Amino acid sequence: MPVTALSSGALSALPAMPAPALGPEWLDAANIITKIVEWFGPWAIVGVMLVIFAETGLLVGFFLPGDSLLFTLGMFVATGAVGVPIWVAAPLLWVAAIVGNQTGYLIGRKAGPAIFNREDSRLFKQEYVERTSAFFEKHGGKAITLAQFVPIVRTFTPVMAGVGRMRYTHFLGFNMLGATFWAFAITWLGYFLGSITWIQKNIDVMILAIVFVSVLPMLISAVRSKLGSSKATSEQPAVVEVEVAE
């Protein structure tokens, strides 16, 4: 399927996007895609794929707005600003996410310990590694699937799986499941819902809602587990120490 030429009229017809509420303006997904469209022209989808690959596969890309990027790209495809049909764009982004995650796993398996022992910098902080490690250890294999919907954690989880020597076929199965839902669902949502004015003005809120719904089962499971532990503790018979006078 050939990539159609970009229409400058389609770009100018795009709705004016508000300043991002959750980050600096240069990280706004609409701004990023607009620049990619200007630089790559009819091959803009390739530029977006590179960004998704960097965000899911390279540690330095953890700050990139993957969720918003997918949703906004769906909007751009719907308006014709990106000259690729949605049924081509979504699978291509899925491939970029899969390849990125496999790259992250390989990085973790080959060089993870050396990378994670580095000192904090302006972008990299040990806190990110610790947060991902705790998430991964608590939820095991399903963390690979759920992490795809959680910014920052999404970038570090494949690497942690590599560091922990998780069996590759095990990782690949959970990863493909998460990447499939992530790439297809969010891109198609942007395609179908992006024409709604309220959503155009509140993309950050929409993305937060998607993340919340995605991790809700995990949150419910965690609450149930905690309540179960508390109940088990409260049902344990009290042990009374009695001093016996000699």
Image: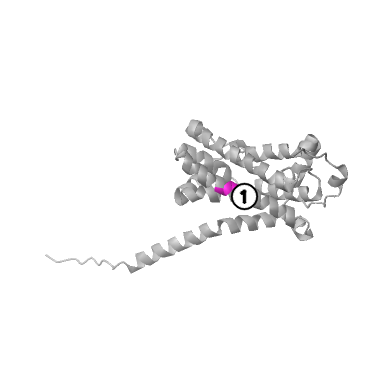
Bounds of the magenta segment: 177-181
Residue at point 65% right, 49% down? 184
Residue at point 68% right, 39% down? 49
239 relative to 124, above or below = below
Front in this rendered view, residue 112 or 244: 112
Residue 124: horizontal and vertical position, in percent?
A: 58, 38
Q: Quadrant of the N terminus?
A: top right
Residue 31: horizontal and vertical position, in percent?
A: 77, 44
Q: Which residue was labeled with disc 1?
A: 182
149 relative to 59, above or below = below
Residue 130: horizontal and vertical position, in percent?
A: 50, 44
Q: Is residue 80 visible?
A: yes
Residue 87: horizontal and vertical position, in percent?
A: 71, 47
Residue most extreme to the left = 246
Q: Quadrant of the C terminus?
A: bottom left
Number of callouts:
1
- Taking the image as shown, residue 121 lies to the left or right of residue 15, namely left
Amino acid beneath label 1: Trp
Front in this rendered view, residue 202 or 57: 57
Residue at point 76% right, 36% down? 43
Front in this rendered view, residue 152 or 34: 34
Q: How is the image coloured?
A: one colour
- Could you tell me which secondary element the residue under label 1 belongs to? helix
Q: Is residue 178 magenta?
A: yes
Residue most extreme to the front = 1
Front in this rendered view, residue 116 or 245: 116
- Taking the image as shown, residue 79 lies to the left or right of residue 224, namely right
Q: Is residue 134 visible?
A: no
Q: Is residue 90 magenta?
A: no
